[in-house]
Image (cartoon, grey):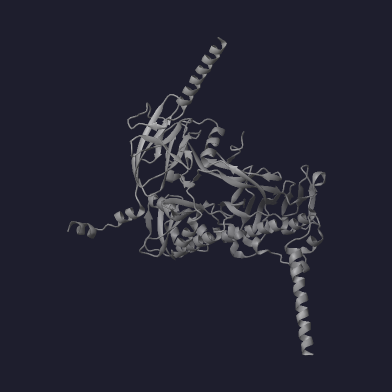
Amino acid sequence: MFSERVKSIILSLLILSSLLMTGQIWFNKKLWPDGYDFFVIYENTLLGKIFGTSDNEENMQSRDKIVLPIKMVASTISDFDNVSYVLTENKEEFNTAFGYVREVLTAVFNKDFKNVITTNEEEWQQNININGIYIDFGITYNTLTFADFIDAGNTKLVANINEVREFVIAPGDSVTNDVVLFIKDAKTGSIYKFYSGVSKNELTGLLQRLAGKATKDNNFSFSLRADKPTGIAGEVLFDPYMLLNQRTQQTTDVISKNPLLRGSGEHIEFNNAIIEKILNAFQINSNTVKKHMDANSTLVYVDDRATLKISRQGIIEYKSMAGARGLQLSTAKDVNNSVVKSARLGADFMDKVMRACNGSAQGIRLASFAKNQSSIKLGFDYTHEGLPVKLENNGFCVEIEMEGGYLKSYIHYIRSYEVTSVVANNVSTYAAADLLYNYLPNRQDAFLIKDMYLAYVDDMNEGEKKAQWVAKVNGLDGFITGFDTVK
Amino acid sequence: MTKKLVSVISFMLCVCLFTTVVAFASPAVIGPDETGNSDSLIYLKKPTTNSVTTTERNYTITGAGIPGVEVTIYRRSVFDGNFYRVFQGGYMLEQTIGASGLFVVSIELVDGGNTIRINAENEIERQIIEINITRVSSSQIERINNLSIGDLFNAFQ
């Protein structure tokens, strides 16, 4: 009798676990062909939520990607040479290295320093070039805002440092077992040196491991004095902290797909199941909302709060009506006063829309941040294979405006990027600079290249995209592209 | 007669061809007393002086110059004092300055003194810059840096 009961219990547990596993496969791994909507309809129902996982843990990371470096370079000595290793998101050491960087940043921002040490550009550059990690977040933050983002909101550093963007961490000298953090005030240019209290063993171990992969190929412009003019007419100068690579670089082509559409040839149409999920994400009732299709075949939904447009190019555009507060993403009262909470809400919502659209990119990163009196504006770019994805029109892949816990406006270029097996060789930074010079109108004065890097440039058409050189030149708006593909 | 004419023309063509080639190619050897006729084809950015000390095995020389100028690196031979073109990895250290005007060359150093000449030339002008790069080992640098007042006193006892 007892054994029969045990058998029944075990059998019941086995049946239940197989149902849960099947639900995982069906609703989480999405093993159905495109356009087969049966399971999609039930995915967000109670059954779908019980037997599936509605939130894949990988997709809940956007809020952590609000503060990510656009450039992280580890430098050390190997075989008597200065070598460096560029840590991009697709490198296996990236998470370890950035986790360590955050630990040091948080330690310093949380500490109360009795004496604040200033240093000079020479020491800053020496540590970047010889033995340290250089981090550029790409965006200039108010010190308090940055501290909030790394959960060190009560920082005392704000008394000395106005704005931050670039940091250097380096092992301390042989006397202390400490890691030193250098912070450059982005507003004044002053450089401060802080002893973090974090043991340097992990940092030295990390630098030793990276030394095996580091090369002499990448050099900071300042180490070559490529930022210093010689007086020659029309001379090209490079920003001191720009990386110059002497060698050709290999990149992989990617295919850009619009997941909002399905079908092929003349039978391309909107994927109604995904449109339904988008409407749900924006809390729009498809039965009561006013809807029409405009002359460009863009779906337009209008309710009393906002307008939502979904274009065939894969652009979702949401705008709250004048006087309306927008889509409420949080009822918490403290969101109104917290830039960080507001930004994280926006990033979480972006995740939700990406999941609704089956969009995917290997990464997504904050590329622009602006705060005015009542609202914040965030701009995100996709990243793929460690390279940013830039839109040809100079816009961001995602633009969000938040006012407290409310979404005021939202523009999202939905895409899925898949890697191909096609490998391309891209010219060196120097050759790219030559091409850029020939591409721009004749210049008599020296011109400064603020930044130049390889990126996937998306012209908003589906298809194969190659990595291209993009450049930011002092005095010219936006970024310049296409100069390395001109025949 | 025809044969003679053809052979004379061929000979003239060869002379023209070879002189043209010789005129544009940098020489294989530069004598210690050779100088150029210009000082404005290129300007060095790194090194900033004509004499530097480094611990690096590979030293990167950078500069700016007029596009189209051919820059060739020579190293002085300890045997005869002449300067010979440098080959590394099977390639000659030579570069034609591109539109951006920047040139970058990395040269592998030997321990001790390295006397280098940078030869820049185009069709009508030539510039030669000589630099001395002394490579010391990092342990030597550490010994120098770690010398204390006590060490100096001990040295005089």
Q: Nearer the viewer, residue A167 or A463?
A: A463
Q: Is A221 placed left or right of A377 in the picture?
A: left
**Image position, residue A213 (x, y; %):** 51, 54
Where residue B3 sits, quadrant-wise, is top right
Q: Is residue A164 something one can see in this rendering?
A: no
Residue A218, compared with residue B17, is above or below; it is below
Q: Quadrant of the N terminus of chain A?
A: bottom right
Q: Is B6 placed left or right of A277 in the picture?
A: left
Residue A107, compared with residue B115, is above or below; it is below
Please count the marks in the image: 0
What residue is drawn where x is 35% and y is 38%? B77
Furthest residue in direction left, as rendered: B157
Residue B38, compared with residue A259, is above or below; it is above
Q: Nearer the viewer, residue B71 or A370?
A: B71
Q: Nearer the viewer, residue B135 or A310?
A: B135
What residue is drawn where x is 62% and y is 54%? A364
Q: Is A13 placed left or right of B66 in the picture?
A: right
